[in-house]
Image: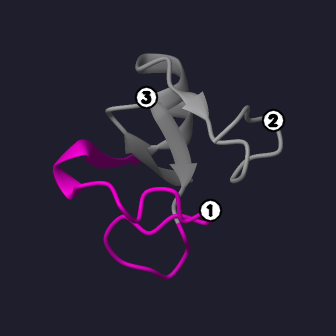
Amino acid sequence: MNGVLNETTNKIHQHESGRSDFQTTCGATSHVAHDHLRLVPVEQAVSDVDANRCGRCFDDGGGY
């Protein structure tokens, strides 16, 4: 599953299925400039980048 990584906060959000660009389930990235966002596999972001999961997008996440 792909997610949207906010490189500023190091938070991974669930990519909203069927939407283009960087739309997320929680909408938290709607105000973030696209040059700070990256579309990546969720597990890769958690393991390689040590990103935290968004609590709104993922049951096992913390905060938003």
Q: Check if residue 37 falls in the magenta segment.
A: yes
Q: Residue 22, image x and y in percent?
A: 36, 64
Identify the element where label 1 is drawn.
loop
Residue ID at (44%, 69%): 23
Instruction: Give the residue number, with chain letter if any, for mark 2.
Output: 60
Of the image marks 3 and 1, the number of the one nearer the N terminus? 3
Label 3 Cα crowd, 10 Å radius (few <14 / some 14-19 / many 20+)? some
Instruction: Decide if residue 21 is on the left or right side of residue 43.
Output: left
Residue ID at (51%, 40%): 12
Mark-to-mark CA distance, 2 and 1: 15 Å
Q: Disc 3 marks which amino acid?
A: Asn
Instruction: Give the residue number, with chain letter if any, for mark 1.
Output: 26
Q: Check if residue 35 falls in the magenta segment.
A: yes
Mark-to-mark CA distance, 3 and 1: 16 Å
Identify the element where label 2 is drawn.
loop
| Magenta-drawn segment | 16-40
Label 1 Cα crowd, 10 Å radius (few <14 / some 14-19 / many 20+)? some
Q: Residue 46, image x and y in percent?
A: 54, 26
Residue ID at (72%, 52%): 56
